[in-house]
Amino acid sequence: MKGLAILLPLIILAFGPGRADATTIIGDLNNFDTLNDTGQVCYGFEIEIDDVISTDITYTYDWNHYGPPKIRQDNTDPAHPKVFVRYESTKDASGNWGANGSFTNQAQPTTTPPAGHSCTNPNVNEGCEHFGVGYYGTPSAIKYNWLIDGGGGNLVYFGSPLAVAAPKIAYIPPAAGQPAQAVAAIPAPVVPDPVGKEFGEPSWVKVIKTTTHNTNPVALQDLISDDADNDGLADWQNKEPDQVETEWYLLQANNGANPAKAELQGGADDMGDGSETVTRRYEFYRYGAAADTLDGENGEAMCSEGNPTTDPIDPNYLHGVGDNVAVTDANGNTYYVNCAAQVVVGNYIGAQMAGFAAAAPLGLIDHLQGGESGTPYMPRTVVVGGNTPFVITIPNGSLPPGLTIDPQTGVLSGTPTAGGDFPFTVHATDFDSVSASQTYSLHIAGLAAPQVDLVVAKQGSGSGTVAGSSIDCGNNCSVHLDAGTAVSLTATPAGGSVFTGWSGPCTGTGSCDFTLNATSTVNATFTQQWLLSVTNAGGGTGTVTGNGINCGTTCSLLFDQGTAISLAATPTNGSVFTGWNGDCSGTGACNTTMAAARSVTATFVPPTQQYTLGVTSTGNGTVTSSPKGINCGKHCSASFTVGTSVTLTAKPAKKHLFLGWTGACNGASLTCTVPTMMGDTSVVANFN
């Protein structure tokens, strides 16, 4: 089972070991607006995440001027891998960057965040973009860089990394009498330290949080500064009111000279049983005070923020505090500056929007980057959240030949063996029976594989369907696929039929799995089955056996179309078998063929069963019997035990003739024998 502290749908928290009741889980978030204040047009943006691997990357935010990013992994230092998430422009026919609007204009300097859709609407290009990436793991550093045209057809970094930091959240599971808690912290941005200085570039952060928490899921595309549903609340607020937690706070990476400036620790937020969500917005601004407010020896920024107590006339708290702040120059000399006279909060740089939940439901990522035939595909986690193990199928389309999705990890990997565009659907079900589906179109550069035909032929007397690998047969019993495609077919019989097996590239009755290297025909045989029902009657005892039937009372069995049936009736305990009814007759073997549903009855009677033999005479004469019982002229009857053989003798009157028997006897002999009394029987003796 995956660790439970992962992000909300469409954004994943990074964390360490799986959750235990007494552990604390640390998570990072990364979903942000950023202004292009480079002073020139930019053609992309790259996020560097240190000490994670490509399969740790889950969701990416792709609704900007660049679309889905490219992801690569740098293993130059195997002990400390780096992943680069690169949003990159496309080139036009002349080889220039920026085709189809894939660029970011220079933003106008501002001390406030841009309004409206300028960061989140690709149809607007006012110098603000929204990017985002979710990941597992515990990164040691996250850096952000604008990309500019470096000449020679290459994009290069502009200057130093952007001064926007990724927050991290410590999750403390609930304990006895203690609700679950989330403690958010924002570190100083990862920027290079000036040569010989103890402190890096200073920046301001404004922290905004929701006042209450709820269980609403937050999708990655909702963790933005926009108000898409026009409810008066920014989407990141998760439909809750917001408040300022810390108005302005100065952050500055340092080597421990002033730990208070290295990271802003927030207070603990109660999350009840852990089902609630916490959302945050962190706004970043440049340090706007004069250069002489930086310590000349170590680079520390000495002008701190304003607050309502010391600066009641500045409602935005943009000015510094103190009119006699000591600063040391590069030579160790001390001088004093008036911070209260300085606007220390500079222009807006960007903002991180964060959402945290202790568990994420099953989901699939939105997009997959393309690949190249013959080049190993950068492994990507496709199935995220949920509870492992997964059951993963491709119900429609097929993966590019050479690629597979691991059913345990949900990771797509391999080396494509042919180029082309490959549409396919991934369906995943987790251990808790939660399901999710997503359709992708994966472009693989390179020569397309030759196409061959996959044909499914249904055979036999029955009916059913065959599905998989773009086959739906039923309706579509053939398809063109790339040579090398991994085929997986499943046969499902219709009611009254049974699937009896494959022939061709597959055998057996399980799924048909093989690699399609040439045009192939797969035969699926469905056989019609009919029910044979056997019933015992008559009050006696006995068994009916044959063709798998073995019953003493009532039994039934399914048989394939055309099966030859032969049943034998065996009386027991002195009972007598008196014959078949239904689809068989007589007292011999019951022989029939299963061309339809069949039903037969075997009659067994007790050894004491009595049957009546009735005799009628026409004309003048008498009839007697052996054993005794019949002695009559016109009409008489007698009872005989089942199975008894009765001989009748006709005696015509004087001057009269015997004309013959009808009924259970026939012929003109004066005697006739009723072989066995298997039921009530009648005989007519005809005299003149």
Image (cartoon, rainbow, N blue to C red):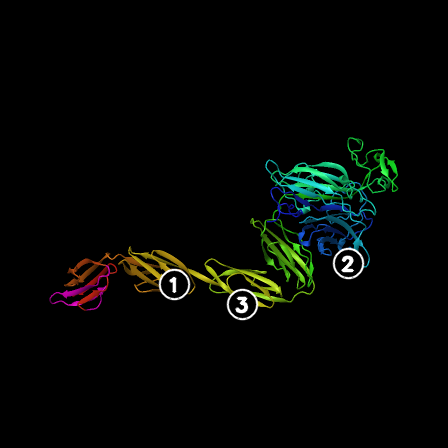
Q: Can residue 475 be seen in this view?
A: no
Q: Which residue is drawn at 61% across and 59% down?
A: 397
The numbered mark, 3 or 2, whose residue comes first in the sequence reads 2
339 or 587: which is nearer to us? 339
Q: Is residue 587 left or right of residue 517?
A: left
- The residue indicated by pointer 3 is 504
Q: Is residue 406 left or right of residue 224?
A: left
Q: Which x, y percent locates residue 488?
A: 57, 61
- The residue indicated by pointer 1 is 547
Q: Residue 132 carries which label?
A: none
- Magenta range is 642-668
Q: From the viewer's perspective, is residue 668 above or below residue 358?
A: below
Q: Which x, y percent locates residue 509?
A: 50, 62
- The residue indicated by pointer 2 is 92
Q: From the viewer's perspective, is residue 254 above or below residue 90?
A: above
Q: Tell me the amino acid under the disc marked 2.
A: Asp
Q: Tell me the amino acid under the disc marked 3.
A: Gly
Q: Tell me the amino acid under the disc marked 1.
A: Asn
